[in-house]
Image (cartoon, coloured by chain):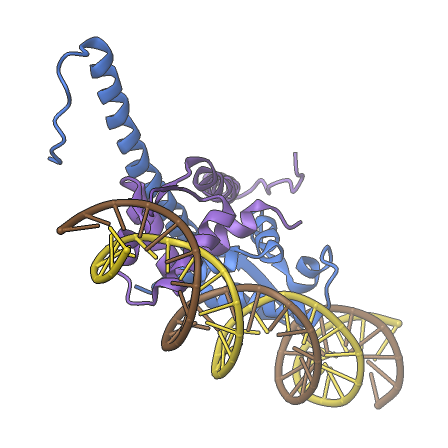
Chain colours: A blue, B purple, C brown, D yellow
Amino acid sequence: MANYLDSFFSALGDPTRRAVIARLASGPAPVGELHAPHDIALPTFLRHLKVLEASGLVRSEKVGRVRIVHIEAGPLAAAEDWLTRQRRIWEGRLDRLDALAERLERDETSPPDDKDP
Amino acid sequence: MANYLDSFFSALGDPTRRAVIARLASGPAPVGELHAPHDIALPTFLRHLKVLEASGLVRSEKVGRVRIVHIEAGPLAAAEDWLTRQRRIWEGRLDRLDALAERLERDETSPPDDKDP
DNA sequence: CAGATAGTTAGCCATGCAGCTAACTATTCG
DNA sequence: CGAATAGTTAGCTGCATGGCTAACTATCTG
């Protein structure tokens, strides 16, 4: 079950890379500018960018001697969707429990059936 | 800038662990049941659970010789929020670009000001 | 053209993580 | 009590990942 979400989430599992995404959310930027706030060597940083690009979260193109990096909306939304879906299921379950609790409060004599419809 | 999101996202960067979360979204389960669908050794699987638990995405308690695992809503929501926030910024930017494009279409004579209010 | 600037490639090291087997502890059940 | 069940711990392997320096290419700019 190894799919594209693997690379999205593990790419986001690193603070440097998340910071890059956060920066790119407000607009494209060249490598140098993205690198500046991070206290790591450029080649190391470059590899973070490659991870982001390999995951599809980011694209880049070279303009002269500068490489401009920009965010890719789709994958970010896909990761968000996965989380939202899990939350919905989870909340749906809570809702059902709430409803059950409510029902039990109103009428403590009738026990719930434990079927799974 | 290493915060709790690191562990959330990297925990979710593994298909086995994401499958566990997906399963747990619809209710708590014992270790054995969670393990069953995965074709890996139990100790290996156990370590995935430990990663999830260390990240706070999951809690567990021992009942007799069985360990019941259940999802923890908060962290999942936190991860989702981070993504949502990035998307909002990104979309806000797109909106601004759209508005700009629209304005340019309506009136090509007046150039946009490039202030950043 | 020469020097500065912006990335890029190569190669090394340490740590972490996923996988395994073997052997052990703790509970439950007949 | 003794066997079965459910986890757990220990210890090993191999590969991926994050960090570095050194050396290189490609593109401006004076």
Compare residues A35 and A117 and report the one nearer the observer: A117
- Tell me the quarter of the picture where residue A32 sits: bottom right
Q: Residue at x 64, y 61 (%)?
A: A30
Q: Please, is residue D26 above or below residue A14 in the view?
A: below
- Tell me the quarter of the picture where residue A84 sits: top left
Q: Residue at x 51, y 44 (%)?
A: B86
Number of labelled discs? Answer: 0
Q: Position of residue A110 (x, y in %)?
A: 13, 15
Q: Please, is residue A44 above or below residue A91 in the view?
A: below
Q: Quadrant of the C terminus of chain A?
A: top left
> Left of B24 or right of it: where is A61?
right
Q: Quadrant of the N terminus of chain A?
A: bottom left
Compare residues B20 and A17 and report the one nearer the observer: B20
Q: Please, is residue A103 above or below residue A58 in the view?
A: above
Q: Position of residue B89 (x, y in %)?
A: 53, 41
Q: Residue at x 51, y 55 (%)?
A: A12
